[in-house]
Amino acid sequence: MAISQNNVSASSSKKLSFLDAIKKRSIQPQHQNSLNSSQKPKTNHSGNVSKTPSSSKVHLNSKNAQAKRYQVVQLQVNTTHSKLDNSNKNIYAKAKTVFQALETAQKSNIIDNRNSTAKIFTLPEFFWSQYGTAFSKDQEQYTLNTIQEFARKEQFEGTVFVLGTMVTARPPEALKNITNKELNTIQEKLGLNLKEAYADATAAKEEPNGPVSKDRRFLSSIGDMYNAALEKANKNNDANITRETIFKNVLDRAGIMKDNLEGMKALWAVPHDAWPSNDDLAKLQQAYKNNKNVEVKNTLEEWMQPWSKKSTLDKEHIPAIMNFFEKAGNSDNAKSLMGEFREHVFPNMVPAEEKSQLSANLDTKDKKKYPEIDNKSMFRSFENKAITIEGGANGKMEFVSKVLPSLIDSPNYHNASSQPHFEKNAYQLHPSLNNPMTNTSTMKKNAKNAGVTPESFTYSSEKTGLEIGIAICRDYSDGTYGILADRKLKNTIHHGQVISAGVEHLNPKNMNSLKSLAMNDGANNVYGMVTNDLKTSEQKNSHIFKYHDTQKSFTYEASPSNHKMQMQPIDNNNNYTFNISETVHHRDSRASSTSSLNSQTNVGAFDAVNKSIKSFKNDLAKVTAEIDSAADMYHALGGKMYNNRGGNDKSNNANENEIIKKVNSSLDILKHNNKNKVNDKETAKNTLLKFIKEKSATEKDLKNNIKSANEFLESAPTSNNYTAIKKKKESELENNKVIQ
């Protein structure tokens, strides 16, 4: 029988695995009133969303169940430059902006609104918590409840939201069981003021660059001792021992360690398996009483081998060592205290720099005598997790947590890593407890210990029938997903989604999926969507549409995969930019016929594309004329033709002064040259050549935009062009492939 909660407390009960407690922790919608544009979630006096009983998990027969096709819709925002802090007001404003943006896209028909087309709507990494900061648990819960309230609207039925990530600070493991009352008791018993140390350890922010205070180190040591004692009591099923008794015993032993810290630190050098007997200790104590200091020093150094082979015991530590032995009473008690000290106190109390000095003179073969125990439990961790939820009523919410942090996860890391007091465990991700320096073998071990499995990276949408693989930033780019999940998942997931802030390239080899792969990056302005059309390797473009709030309309901005354009933070920004994929078939079906199409299908996108094509062509004509004019002047000044441009002015004897005057009278060239006029032939030639090259790049982009826009018009189905698309597909695909 386990210890009752009245004795030890619920916090020391059996831990759930990562898969049970984190990845498969489905949060069911709260039954509150739906939000509208002016209504916020009901909150209690502390500002948290009021709790109501959660609904049971249900399997729905939705009108979108087993959708025939899907489309990826990515809201592109810069998340590393947002100035919005983590207040509930700003969290709510972000949620409102996100869901209004999708609602606007739906109403404007720039996405495929057929009931049989599921939408995968995405956001980038660090969207919810301000970059470089972290949520508290209350802020995390408020965010999740707010998302649920917006997502449960009926118009989002058939949408799977992969809503970027939030970063939440997790208090140090060492302090998880210490209550406020017990903290006060520790202070009174040991004569310490630990409130500041406790506040520093549990703050929802990144660890500072400076060294950790001694008070915080000792408080963490007490917490580790307490956790171990509670766990041991539970394991032994001792129902008679109380939490109060366990806490008192821990505090008594911690008091001895506090008063004898220097002596016990010095005794670290005595291997635990070579601890002296009671008789040996009694002889040492007698020699010390008789002032035989050389004999005492020699005896201690003999006990401290192999460390003492290359190191010398500081004689100033001898009184501290002997005081500890006297306080312990006998060798058995001293060994027991030292065992606890080695495991729970030494890792925390001795800074990294001092640990390095202690072990510097040890031979490699001797280091196994002094097993290194990490101090991960002393530091808070940060969970960077992606939020996925089905739209509509009773949408299932699940999370995928990042396994391997990158430098962008810890802005202080780069500066701190060069400091002598640097503690790598101060920059660890929950639940795997990896840090940016963790190597591959250790990463795999930590992930396994945290319960990470291939399924930890997946989301199964019961409403749409979609299986989605999700990887966050470095987990994708550095191959963590590939190592931990890809081998098992590559033949099971339909769509792979990368959520990132700093990944520069979309590489299908890093994440194998059956149908498609997309990335939403919040830092590099990288857009990417790769689609594999069943057995072919046909790569499809995604298309960029921008909503202009003042005109209440969309424009078609650009096109090719990996096209870059300037993204803006979400801060008070009603001009949305979407990256929208072509539709991807999900289920084998020849029934995807014109019956699902009507006059409104994709009509908003078609209108925006047609308007943009006219604009692109007008701009192209203007740019081409500018290039040709500049190329003629460049050629007239003796320059070689650039890409076969120029040469229309056949007069090689043209007056140079007239050409220079013409260059200086061109408003386009002057603007391009920062309004600086040219005074000689060579300067004019250099200015013209630079102008031609840069305008040629613009010309190329415009041609690509027109090409991509026309490809969109040819591929996006409407009731008008469906027959042509069908015939094209039938001629291209084998008999066993899907008709789109």
Image (spheres, rainbow, N blue to C red):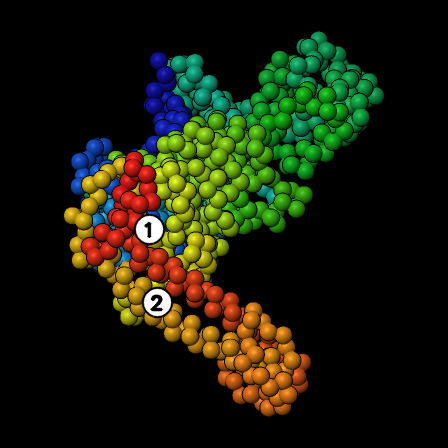
Where residue 683 sits in the image (x, y, percent)?
65, 80
Image-based side of 647 in relation to 562, left or right: right
Residue 418 in view (yes/no): yes
Disc 2 residue type (three-letter): Ile
Q: Label 2 neighbourhood size at 10 Å, few (<14), some (14-19), many (20+)?
A: many
Q: Earlier in the sequence, mark 2 or mark 1?
A: 1
Q: Which residue is mark 1?
A: 582
Q: In terms of depth relative to the viewer, which is nearer, 597 or 237?
A: 597
Placement of the C terminus among the 4 image quadrants: top left
Vertical placement of residue 150 versus 174, above or below: below
Q: Which residue is mark 2?
A: 613
Q: In terms of depth relative to the viewer, which is nearer, 659 or 503?
A: 659
Disc 1 residue type (three-letter): Glu
Q: Residue shown at 28%/40% (left/top)?
A: 738
Q: Residue shown at 22%/40% (left/top)?
A: 590
Image-based side of 629 in relation to 367, left or right: left
Residue extending farthest to the top is: 279
Where residue 540 sits in the image (x, y, percent)?
38, 49
Mark 2 vs mark 1, CA separation in Å: 18 Å
Q: Residue shown at 19%/46% (left/top)?
A: 593
Vertical placement of residue 666 versus 505, above or below: below
Where residue 167 sits in the image (x, y, percent)?
43, 45
Q: Label 1 neighbourhood size at 10 Å, few (<14), some (14-19), many (20+)?
A: many
Determine whether the residue tagged by mark 1 lies in a helix, strand or loop.
Answer: loop
Residue 678 in view (yes/no): no
Placement of the N terminus among the 4 image quadrants: top left
